Image (tube, rainbow, N blue to C red):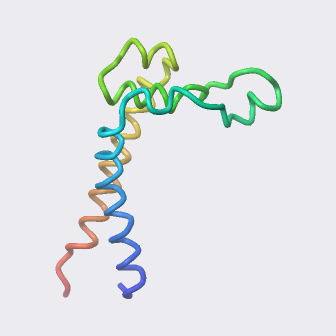
Amino acid sequence: MNIIKYHKLWIQTSFLLISPIVLLILPSDYFDEGNSICITKFLFKMECYACGMTRACMHLIHFEFVDAYFYNPLAFIVVPLLVLLFILRLNRNLKILFAKKQ
C-alpha cells in the first residue's frame, strides 16, 4: 500500500472513531431547530420519507425512543443498519492498517 492510501485510510479510520463520540456528546436536540434542507420539501412543499431522519437518529442514539418515533419511525430501521455498516467499515479499515507485512 502506498503512503497516500495509507494516510487516507488512517484519516478515514480516525473519523470513524471520533464521529460517534461527537454525536453522543452533542445534546439530543442539537438538530431540532433550524431550516430544512430537504429538496423535496423545498420544491414540492411535502415531506419525503427521510424528513426528520437526522433528528430521529440523534434522539435514538440518546435513547429517547418516543421523540425518535415522533420525528421519523424509519429511524428504528436505519440506525441499526448504520451501526452495522459502521462496524463493518471500521473492522475492514483496522484489518488493512494492522495487517502483517509479508
At x 35% / y 79%, what residue is drawn? 6
- Quick one: 88 or 67, which is closer to the camera? 67
Rendered location of residue 65, percent (x, y): 36, 16
Q: Which quadrant of the figure has residue 2?
A: bottom left
Rendered location of residue 53, percent (x, y): 52, 29
At x 41% / y 23%, what residue is drawn? 76
Q: Which quadrant of the figure has residue 42?
A: top right
Q: Residue furthest right?
A: 43
Rendered location of residue 39, percent (x, y): 74, 36
At x 19% / y 87%, what residue is drawn? 102
- Quick one: 80 or 62, which is closer to the camera? 62
Tell me: residue 75, above or below residue 93.
Answer: above
At x 69% / y 22%, what residue is drawn? 47
In the picture, the quarter occupied by the N terminus is bottom left
Tell me: residue 59, above or below residue 94.
Answer: above
Rendered location of residue 56, percent (x, y): 46, 25
Tell me: residue 56, above or below residue 23.
Answer: above
